[in-house]
Image: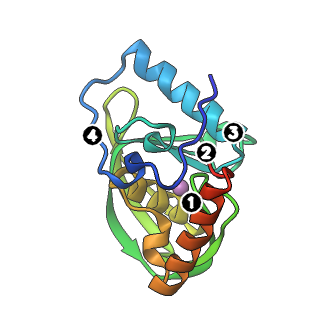
Amino acid sequence: MVYSIVKFGDPVLEREAETVTEFDTPELHQFLEDMFESMYAAKGVGLAATQIGFSRKIAVIDCSNGENPEEKLVLINPQVLKVEGKQDGEEGCLSIPGFREQVKRAKRVTVRAQDAKGVEFERTGEDLLARALQHETDHLYGKLYIAHISALKRDLMKRKIKKKQRAGDWD
Ligand code: NI
């Protein structure tokens, strides 16, 4: 099933999610399938469980937009192990629709995570994948990409969002 995406302002997005302790259950496999379906429906390259209202350390990524099954990535309880280099590029978030900002990120990132069966693995990504790995791992710690932009830009964005909320154009 396709879940609707929780938008900025909902406290679930700014809380650290709970660590997953049960693996390889039918519920978890179904949930992961639903997360991919929800991500593709929203045309995103990554989705964190907190963005559909579940405070669990689970994220999915697919930088191929569903074109290449080998790029489907499930991250459970991910942690960033290593960052190298720098990249500057535009970034957005499904939970903050209509906004994009330049965000500095590491160029190359290694995360350690568990898969659906609880097996630990490490994954290194560059460029867009590195950006997605950082963005989605941040989500699971209650951190949004706007934490990485200037306070001035962030305040301006929050003011615009408040205006949209008042106009009933946000939920
Ligand atoms: Ni996001």
Q: Which residue is mark 3?
A: 40
Horizontal and vertical percent for residue 49?
A: 45, 39
Q: Which residue is mark 4?
A: 18
Disc nearer the start of the sequence (3/1): 3
Name which residue lies at 51% across and 64% down: 130
Frontmost of labels 3 and 4 is: 4
> Toward the viewer: 110 or 167?
167
Q: Is mark 1 within 8 Å of ligand 1?
A: no
Instruction: Please say if 90 is above or below 164.
Output: below
Disc nearer the start of the sequence (2/3): 3
Name which residue lies at 45% across and 37% down: 53
Instruction: Please say if 106 is above or below 24.
Output: below
Side (left or right) of 111 relative to 35: left
Q: Please, what is the three-letter code of the amino acid marked with disc 4?
A: Glu
Q: CA distance from mark 4 to mark 1?
A: 24 Å
- Asked which secondary structure carries label 4, the reply is loop
Looking at the rendered structure, which numbered label has been put on residue 171? 2
Side (left or right) of 106 relative to 90: left
Side (left or right) of 30 relative to 4: left
Frontmost of labels 2 and 3 is: 2
Name which residue lies at 59% across and 69% down: 127
